[in-house]
Image: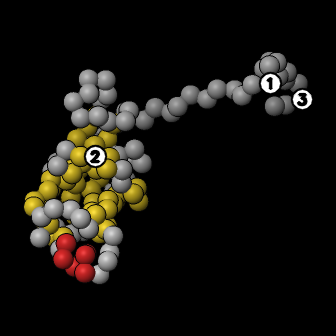
Amino acid sequence: MSNNQTNTNTNNSCIKFSTPSYPMLVPSISYLSNYFVDTYKLKSTNTPSLLIYIFGTNFTNYSMVVINNIMYNPIFNGSTNIAFNVPNDIQKGIYNVEVINSNTIPTPGSQNSQYLVSNKLQFEVI
């Protein structure tokens, strides 16, 4: 504030800032760091989880990873790389992986949030 300006905020409260608005872009998955997870190796080495990296485009720090319709909060490494933990107690099977970008906290089936879904890739737990 310059010397000639007067503070009109007389009640000493914080001045409210608006949340910036960014265009939502559709995320896209190019590839995963691992396509197979060996739970025997995880359990035998007492490793609590395995970190799988997702490489692609248009990831944000608000992106969510969806594995077989269950949402996980990923580790954001940048707009082209996020990661998620696969716990060592995961059941054997084939899992679909998607990334969601949303203007709110996404809830599958919710009518109140707008979200954009990436293509699907799969990894297998053996």
Identify the element where label 1 is drawn.
Answer: loop
When asked about the image quadrant of residue 116, the answer is: top left
Q: Earlier in the sequence, mark 1 or mark 2?
A: 1
- Residue under numbered circle 3: 3
Going 38% across and 33% down the picture, which residue do you hit?
Answer: 104
Structural distance between the alpha carbons of marks 1 and 2: 41 Å
Decide which of 14, 126 is in the foreground and name it. 126
> Closer to the observer: label 3 or label 1?
1
> Closer to the observer: label 3 or label 2?
2
The image quadrant where one finds the C terminus is: bottom left
Going 38% across and 47% down the picture, which residue do you hit?
Answer: 60
Structural distance between the alpha carbons of marks 3 and 2: 52 Å
Seen as rendered, the residue at the extreme bottom is: 45
Identify the element where label 3 is drawn.
Answer: loop
- Give the image location of residue 26, x and y in percent: 26, 41
- Amino acid, disc 1: Asn
Q: Earlier in the sequence, mark 3 or mark 1?
A: 3
Decide which of 100, 5 is in the foreground and name it. 100
Q: Residues within 10 Å of mark 2 (few under 14, many from 20)?
A: some
- Give the image location of residue 123, x and y in percent: 15, 62
Q: Is residue 46 visible?
A: yes
The image's mark for residue 12 is 1
Q: Residues within 10 Å of mark 3 (few under 14, many from 20)?
A: few
Seen as rendered, the residue at the extreme right is: 3
Task: Tell me: residue 30, above or below residue 100.
Answer: below
Q: Residues within 10 Å of mark 1 (few under 14, many from 20)?
A: few
Q: How many marks?
A: 3
The image's mark for residue 71 is 2
Q: Is residue 23 visible?
A: no
Going 14% across and 66% down the picture, which residue do you hit?
Answer: 125
Decide which of 8, 42 is in the foreground and name it. 42
